[in-house]
Amino acid sequence: MISRFRRHVTDNRVIAAILVLYVVLATLYNFANPLFEPPDEIHHYNFIRYLQQTHRLPVVDLDGPETEYHQAPLYYTIAALVTAPLPHESSIAPYAIRNPFWAYEIGQVGRDNKNQYLHDASQRFPSPDAAVWTMHLTRALSTLFGFGTLLLTYFLARCFVSRPMAVGAMAVLAFMPNFLFTSSAMTNDSLTILVSTAVTLHLVTTATVDAPPSPRRWLGLGVLLGLALLTKVSAWPLLAVAALMVVMLSIRLKSWRLFFTAALILTAIVGLIGGWWVVRNVVHYGDLTGLASDWATWGMRKPPTPDTYLSELVSFRRTFWVTFGYGNIPLPEWGYIPIDLFVYGGIGGLVLAAAHFRRVPPTAVRRHQLILLGVWVILAGITLLWFWYRATATNGRHVYAILPVVILAIIGGWHILMPERWHRLLAALFGGLMALLAVLAWAFILIPAYQPSPRLTPDQLLEFAPNRLDWQIGDVAILRGYRLSQPSVRPGDTVTVTLFWEALCTTERSYSAYVHLVGADGETVGRRDSYPGLGNDPTIYWRPGEIIEDAIPVPISVTAEGPIALKIVAGLYDQTIDETLDTRDQNGSIIEYPVIGRMKLAQTQDVALNPQYQLDVTFQHGLRLDGYDLSTIDIRPATTLSLTLYWSPGGPLPIEYATFVHLVDEQDNIIAQGDDPPLGGWYPTTFWGANEHFKDSYSVAVPGDTPAGTYHVLMGLYSLQNMSRLPLENGADAVRLDQDVRLR
């Protein structure tokens, strides 16, 4: 008895600790998440403000912009009443400036344009703006709803599993990152989960009675069902579950009076509380749910095909457990492995339970309870599929009405799978791992997603910007320099080009930064356009004098061909009018084509080269000439001789060299020549790398008055700085090719 009492006290303390830690984490999530970044939060807030300003429910404009005005009104009414005394801005326009680069690589992990809206430091916690605090406090209402959900989840779990496992179910839900995310945002999902859990608990406990329930119990159930009708359509299947419970209870207790009493009271109360909402939807939109108006404004997608099922399931799994923003801020894929193990283990336990039930059937009461939960989950799944084939996107939160039941089912599977002596340890393990995941997701996923770029001091700029420029971009900023994440890339790679901006002013419009990597013939092989800071540092919020370290990842086309020295072109432009800001050098002269530097695009793979004529010639610095091709050995005056050289560098040469190709007579007089930097200037010798093999072509125009005879081809390399030639290992300064050329 004493040990049982001690365990009871210990469990209560654990429950209290879970609730306290939940509130702390939900608050941290609240302030880490910029305003309006959670799904549809701006539309939820607009609904709340509409009620506060007009004192009436809005009607969806079927030809107007997207809204959430079709949603049931209970959450918005409560939020409007609670926050009405708090200070509000007359307009949220300053907080709702859209980021046109939002959702770049939407499923990618990181911070690249994860923000749908632009955010200033004054809008982040702690903010001096009272209206910002009001919106954060409105979010706290969802935290309160989540608090109630956790308590109800514990009592629901106690109907099916041991006390330690019930505490474990509560802990898993409390620290589930997406539950924290939902409980720290302005969303009707938070109230939907609470009301749905309350209805589920009421149904499960009512199914256990041994005598017809009192009218008060039916009255309470009717109130909860009516509130469910006013929270969200995803809770509406509970009406069918409640009807099933009444039928099963009437059959078990053999009481038609119970059936008619319950049906009469529930129908009357639900109709009184929520019936008017259904009638209003029919009057305004022509359907019971009001979803027709939602699809009229948001649009409907084509039904998913079998090819999209897997990707939709992966997205659903992420958005159910852990992903932030509009589903565009996921964990790394390995981060979902512990959750998968937790889920699969629970499913395995349920499978074993199903086999066990065939041998040892449960009592009628327990069977009815399980049927109610099973039907509730099945109906929620059918509703999701129905919604899936119509809505523009499918999200895990669409079934959050059954979230506590799903957690309970998984915990129940483990409850059956493992002996009772392991239950306390399992509960601690699952709750602890989920709490650890919640903290890590907050610290390393959510916060960095919206983190502004670092600000540097002038001394730090000298350290971090190895390539100085000091170019002025319009009247907006000075591009102090740049840094490359790597000096060489291959097709399909991504290189990070870090630009260092010094702000000259706070701009009236947001300018976009661009970095383009340009190859031969002006072909752009890599490009990124974005607001600075990958969306987190728009120029409208720059402060004069601050130095922004703007790291921009640039993907390289998989079809790009190397080796080549790419030109790096960068600057600022106005996206609204597609106008690039002027770039001026340190002397104030306009730079027409702002090439800030160059970087190497290496060969994708080692290519097999078979020259027409083999050579084994080595220049200094390990440069080898392996052979050459000649377009012809019999030429005519006023024609062009083409020569292709096959190079195998030993590494980059210390300075830039050009190649000379001379057609000479027997006395080595130059008859014609074709000098050119390697690959037409697109691959300077300072970029050459060891173990490369590439060919380079040159043309020699033969004058029309050249006399007939035998001529030789001389080639070599000379410095573009002082015209000195690169010596061969034998000391010579040129190579005479073996094959002579005859002029007829």
Image (tube, rainbow, N blue to C red):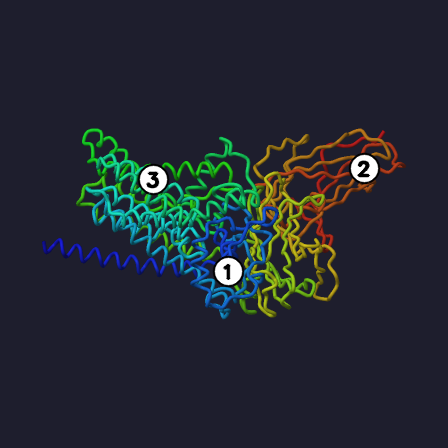
Amino acid type of disc 3?
Val
The quarter of the picture where residue 546 lies is bottom right
Mark 1 lies on a secondary structure that is: loop
Could you tell me how far apart the alpha carbons at marks 3 and 1 are, in whole angstroms? 34 Å
N-terminal of the pair, mark 2 or mark 1, is 1
**Residue 412, image x, y percentages:** 26, 42
**Which disc is residue 55 wearing?**
1
Q: Report how far apart the C-alphas of labels 2 and 1 lie in the structure.
A: 102 Å
Does 631 appear above or below 574?
above
Q: Is residue 147 above or below residue 297?
A: below
Residue 18 spot, x, y in % from top left: 29, 57
Q: Residues within 10 Å of mark 2 (few under 14, many from 20)?
A: few
Q: Is residue 42 left or right of residue 652?
A: left
Regarding residue 428, the answer to whether it shows in the image is no
Report which quarter residue 520 is drawn in: top right
From the viewer's perspective, is 711 left or right of 652?
right
Q: Residue 666 got which mark?
A: 2
Residue 241: assigned label: 3
The percent coordinates of residue 629 (x first, y second) are 70, 33
User: Which residue is farthest left?
Assistant: 1
Task: Please indicate, yes or no, whether residue 570 appears anywhere in the rendered image.
Answer: yes
> Which amino acid does the dot numbered 2 rest on?
Glu
Badge 1: residue crowd in 10 Å (few <14, some 14–19, many ≥20): few
Is 243 on the left-hand or right-hand side of 532?
left
User: Please, what secondary structure does the residue beneath circle 2 have?
Assistant: loop
Q: Residue at x 28, y 33 (%)?
A: 351
> What's the CA distance linking mark 3 and mark 2?
103 Å
Please, what is the three-letter code of the amino acid marked with disc 1? His
- Residue in the foreground of this view, choosing between 22 and 552: 22
Q: Sequence order check: which comes first, mark 3 or mark 1?
A: 1
Q: Is residue 3 above or below residue 381?
A: below
